[in-house]
Image: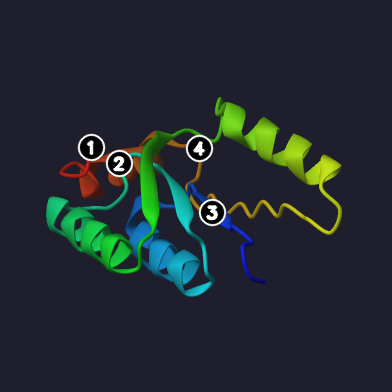
Amino acid sequence: AEGVKHLALISGRTVDNPRLLSEAISAGCSVVYLEKPGAPTVEQLREMKLEASDANVQICMGYNKNVCKYVRKAREFAAQTPGSHVTFVSNNTYEPTAESLGECFERNAEGM
């Protein structure tokens, strides 16, 4: 609808974030909170920045799903706004083991 703003909070696997950003832009989001490091490589971060800029989408980097006040504020806003809704989707595919987390940090070192 005209004048309606859409916000995305992206906190996925680092390797999935470029695709998730594209999907958020395609869905009409005008603001994206992107959890660090954002992408596996600096080059992918540059491509994401260009894609967002071309679509006039603002990206806020550094969002952290575990402590971010924006999650609470989004829920509060939705509760007070007729017809609005908030959907949180979680896809944490890492096992809580040293091997799995070690692989995550090795693969995403440049983006860190």
Image side of residue 44 versus residue 84, left or right:
left
Image side of residue 47 versus residue 33, left or right:
left
Q: Which amino acid type corresponds to the residue marked 4 in the rendered image?
A: Pro
Q: Quadrant of the C terminus?
A: top left
Single out the mark in the foreground, 4 or 2: 2
What residue is disc 3 on?
8
Q: Which amino acid type corresponds to the residue marked 1 in the rendered image?
A: Met
- Dots 2, 1 in contact, CB < 8 A: yes
Q: Earlier in the sequence, mark 4 or mark 3?
A: 3
What residue is disc 1 on?
112
Residue 57 disc label? none
Q: 107 or 50, which lies in front? A: 50
Single out the mark in the foreground, 3 or 2: 3
Q: Quadrant of residue 77?
A: top right
What residue is disc 2 on?
37
Image side of residue 26 versus residue 40, left or right:
right
- Dots 3, 2 in contact, CB < 8 A: no
Residue 96 disc label? 4
Numbered disc 4: secondary structure: loop
Q: Earlier in the sequence, mark 2 or mark 1?
A: 2
Numbered disc 3: secondary structure: strand
